[in-house]
Each structure stands twice: as structure tokens, then as C-alpha cells.
Image (cartoon, rainbow, N blue to C red):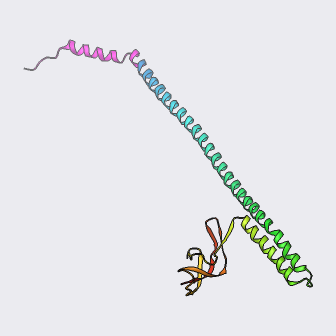
Amino acid sequence: MPKKKNPDINETSKEKDKEKDTPEKNAQAPENEKAEENKESAELQAVREELSNLKKEYDELKDIYLRTLAEYDNYRKRTLKEKDALYLDAKAEVLKNFLPVADNFQRALSASANEDLDSYKQGMGMIINQFLKALSDEGLTEFGNVGDSFDPNIHNCVMHEENEELGENVISEVFQKGYMLGDRVVRAAVVKVAN
């Protein structure tokens, strides 16, 4: 048997539905929407502030980077200039030591041809000694003397001879002296080696 609907129940639920649509309920809906909009607006404002702060921080870091880059470039250029100036100063100082030698050679050339040969040789010997002293003052040392042991790292052997009086691999004659600056070979000695 079909059940009869209770009319009181239907009326009660209709009343409840009407209560839902009351003006108070309708007024709360826009307030909820406004609260959500305010919440979204506050979040958007916070994101904008954070973005603004990040942009400021980025601009500051970019400025620091560009300044550092400019300082490094200036430092590099300045040290390059200082290096060139130092090189020229050192070169001028070395050349200044050789000017008296050049002066003495000019005096020797302008000397009277009437002077005797012995005094001329003595003058040339003095000039050579002055020149070798100038080289020595700059740290240049000569090597490659007769009787030294042959070292292929610093000597250039161009001739070989058998000589019973000298030991094995001993320099018997020097054709051209060698020179070193510190541990660096400037010019190898050209020699003849015995045995």
C-alpha cells in the first residue's frame, strides 16, 4: 500500500526553504564574496610587495656587479700600465750602465793614430773589462772555461779531439763564452771537447 505523504512535513520543509532565501541570508552572500575579494586582494598586494622587494634587491646586486666589473677592468688596465712602465724603467736602468762603455769606445776611435799600439790595446782591454763589469752588475755570469766538464745543457760542442792530457768530456778550447742570468742560459758556450 502506498504511503500517504504527510502534508505537515512538506509544509515544514517549504518553510525552511523560504527561510534560506530570507534577506539576511541574501545579505551574507555578498559579504562572503567581499571577504574573499579582500583576501585575494591582500594576497595580491603581498605578492606585489614581495615582487617590488625582489626587484629592488636585484637592482642593488646588479649595481654591485657592474661596479665590481668596472673596478676589475680599471685594475687590469692600471696594472698593465704599471707593468709596462716598470719594464721601461728597468730597461733604461740597464742601458744606463752601458753608456760609459759606449763613451769609452767613442774616445778610443777618436784617439790619435800616432799613439803606440800597446797603449791602444791597454785602453781597449780596460773598455772590455768595464763592459764585462756592467754585464756582471746586471747579474749576467759567464761560463765555459778550458778544463771545465762538458754539460750539454749549457755547452754547444762543435768539435771533438783526442787529448791524453785532459780527462773525458773536458772542454779543451772555447770558441765563444756562454752567459747565464740566474739559472737561465742566455747563450750556450761554443766549445771543443776532448776524448
The foreground one among 110 and 124 is 124
Q: Which residue lies furthest to the bottom in this view?
A: 162
Front residue of 131/51: it is: 131
Kindly identify the residue that appears in the image at 52 percent across and 30 percent down.
45
* 80 shown above or below 175: above
Residue 47 in the image: state x and y as whole percent: 50, 33
Q: Choose between 108 and 185: the one closer to the eye.
A: 108
Q: Which residue is rendered at x = 57% and y = 81% of the image? A: 166
Q: Main secondary structure of the magenta part?
A: helix
Question: Going by the picture, which residue comes out furthest to the left?
Answer: 1
Q: Is residue 132 above or below residue 54?
A: below
Residue 172 at x, y percent in the picture: 61, 82
Which residue shows up at 86% across the image and 72% down it?
103
Name of the residue lying farthest toward the top: 8
Q: Is residue 11 left or right of residue 124?
A: left
Vertical arrangement, residue 114 with respect to residue 65, above or below? below
The residue depicted at 90 percent of the width and 79 percent of the height is 110
Q: Locate residue 163: give its quadrant.
A: bottom right
Q: Is residue 93 magenta?
A: no
Residue 112 in picture, x, y percent from top left: 92, 82
Please provide percent x and percent y for residue 41.
50, 29
For the magenta stretch, what is the residue range?
Answer: 1-26
From the viewer's perspective, is 187 left or right of 111? Answer: left
State which quadrant residue 49 falls in. top right
